[in-house]
Amino acid sequence: MKQRITFFTIGVSDLDAMKNFYKEKFGWKTMKDSDGIVFFKLNGFIFGLYPRHELAEDIGIKDDGKGFKQFSMAINLNSEKEVDDLFADFKKTGVKIIKAPEKVFWGGYRGYVADIENNYWEFAYNPFLKLDDEGNVQSHQ
């Protein structure tokens, strides 16, 4: 099987509020916003928002998730300055900053924010990771 992701969908409690968060705070444009689901086309895959109880039903599990969801999503940038500039914008627009950008032991630079339902996003600069003009990870082959 090829290593890839086509969709990354999160179950949300308030679909409209979450859609507006990503549109207003991250500046993203919707690809689809109908039939009770919202899609944002990112670089090579789709980030989806779907009502939490419906996603649990679709999977066939009980909707009783609480606390830390045991995952984070990450977007890598091209420099520490880009990370700092983005966090300055987040601060101005009221995005909840969980951890301000800082240098990390492995040589990178990163910080964390949360959306309005406490899904965690890491924004980082990794000096060991090459990105193309679209922000896609480049192969090291």
Image (cartoon, rainbow, N blue to C red):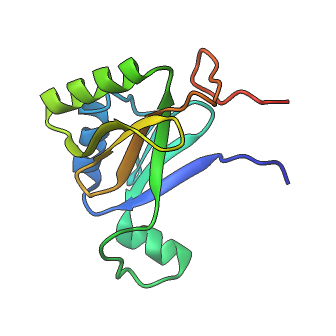
Q: Residue at x 66, y 30 (%)?
A: 137
Q: Nearer the viewer, residue 73 or 116?
A: 73
On screen, residue 14 above or below 93:
below
* Residue furthest to the front: 105
Q: In the shown orientation, is residue 85 left or right of residue 132?
A: left
How many numbered tags mark residues here?
Answer: 0
Q: Residue at x 52, y 36 (%)?
A: 107
Q: Quadrant of residue 117?
A: bottom left
On screen, residue 117 above or below 7:
below
Q: Nearer the viewer, residue 35 or 9?
A: 9
- Image location of residue 27, percent across then percent down: 32, 27
On screen, residue 12 above or below 108:
below
- Image location of residue 123, percent across then percent down: 41, 36
Q: Residue at x 46, y 77 (%)?
A: 57
Q: Quadrant of residue 45?
A: top right
Q: In this orientation, does residue 33 appear?
A: no
Q: In this orientation, does residue 86 appear?
A: yes
- Image location of residue 42, percent across then percent down: 52, 33
- Image location of residue 141, percent across then percent down: 85, 30
Q: Nearer the viewer, residue 19 or 101?
A: 101
Q: In the shown orientation, is residue 66 left or right of residue 126?
A: left
* Quarter of the image that includes the N terminus: bottom right
On screen, residue 132 above or below 129:
above
Q: Residue at x 38, y 46 (%)?
A: 121
* Residue furthest to the top: 133
Q: In the shown orientation, is residue 40 left or right of residue 81?
A: right
